[in-house]
Image (cartoon, rainbow, N blue to C red):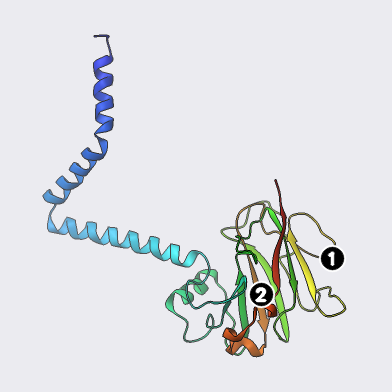
Amino acid sequence: MVAGTEPAAHAAEGTRRTPRARAGQAAGFVSGASPAALALYALALGAGLGLASADWATRGGYPFGGVAVGAWTAWPRAGSTAADPYTRAVNARRGEVPLAVGEGLLLTAAVDDSGRALDATCTYRVAGITPPARAWTLTAAGRGAPEPGRPGLREGFTSTEILREADGRFAIVVGSEVEPGNWLPSPRASGPIRLALRLYDTPVAASAGTLDRDAVPAITRMGCAS
C-alpha cells in the first residue's frame, strides 16, 4: 500500500460520515443533557427562530391587507387603528408615519403591467392618470440598505412639479440613464425596486376596493441593460 493512502481513506470516510456523526452527537447531547440544559436549549432555539421569522416578515412590504389594482396594490388600512400587528411592525421598522384613512391612500408596485418584477437595470414608463386627490407623490426605492457612494439624486415627483400633456396625463420614465421630461433615476444600480404612489386628501381612501385599473398609472417596461 502506498504510504499515506490509508490515512487519506480514513479521512474521506470520516467526511462521508460527518452528517451521521453530527446527528449522533446531537442525539447524545439531548439524551445526556439535564432538564435545565434542555430548557435553555429550547428557549434559545425558539428565540432564534422567532427573531428570524420576525425579521423576514417585516423586511419587505406589508404582508396583509392589500387591494390589487392592476400592477399596483392599495393599502387602505396601513395607517388605521385596525391595522394588523405585522403592518404596525413594518411601520415601526421603517420609522414611517403611514397615511391615516382620512388623510390619504398608499399604493405600491413591485411588478409592471405584465407581472414582471421591477428591476433597477431596466427602464420603465409610468404613465396615465391618478385617482382624484388634492396632491400626490411618486417615489422609487430599492430594497435593503442604500448603496454606499451612490450620489443622492431625485427620489420622486410631486403632482405640483410634474410635466403634463394637454389632457392632464403625464409620463414618468424610471431608469438609470438620463431621459428628457420627467426622469426618475433608479434608486440603485441593480436589484429589485418598488414604486410608491401616495394620494393625499383623496375620496377613494375609504373605498380602495372600487378603484379601476384605468384609474392608476400604467407601468410599462421599455428595455433592460444587456
Q: Is residue 24 left or right of residue 56?
A: left
Numbered mark located on residue 146 in the image = none
Numbered mark located on residue 197 in the image = 2
Q: Is residue 153 visible?
A: no
Tell me: residue 22, above or below residue 171. Answer: above
Q: Is residue 61 visible?
A: yes
| Quarter of image, res 74 | bottom right
Type of the residue with mark 2: Leu
Give the residue furthest to the right.
Answer: 166
Q: Residue at x 63, y 83 (%)?
A: 211
Q: Position of residue 127 (x, y in %)?
A: 75, 71
Q: Nearer the viewer, residue 55 or 10?
A: 10
> Alpha carbon of mark 2 to alpha carbon of mark 1: how far?
19 Å
Q: Position of residue 27 (x, y in %)?
A: 17, 47
Mark 2, Cα crowd under 10 Å, few <14 / some 14-19 / many 20+, is: many
Q: Is residue 25 left or right of residue 64?
A: left
| Quarter of image, res 9 | top left
Q: Nearer the viewer, residue 157 or 70?
A: 70
Q: Position of residue 6 (x, y in %)?
A: 24, 16
Label 1: which secondary element: loop
Q: Position of residue 154 (x, y in %)?
A: 74, 64
Mark 1, Cα crowd under 10 Å, few <14 / some 14-19 / many 20+, is: few
Label 2: which secondary element: strand
Q: Residue at x 67, y 88 (%)?
A: 202
| Quarter of image, res 37 | bottom left
Looking at the rendering, in which quadrant would you find the N terminus?
A: top left
Type of the residue with mark 1: Gly
Q: Nearer the viewer, residue 223 or 16?
A: 223
* Lower position in the chain sequence, tag 2 or tag 1: 1
What residue did someone put label 1 on? 181
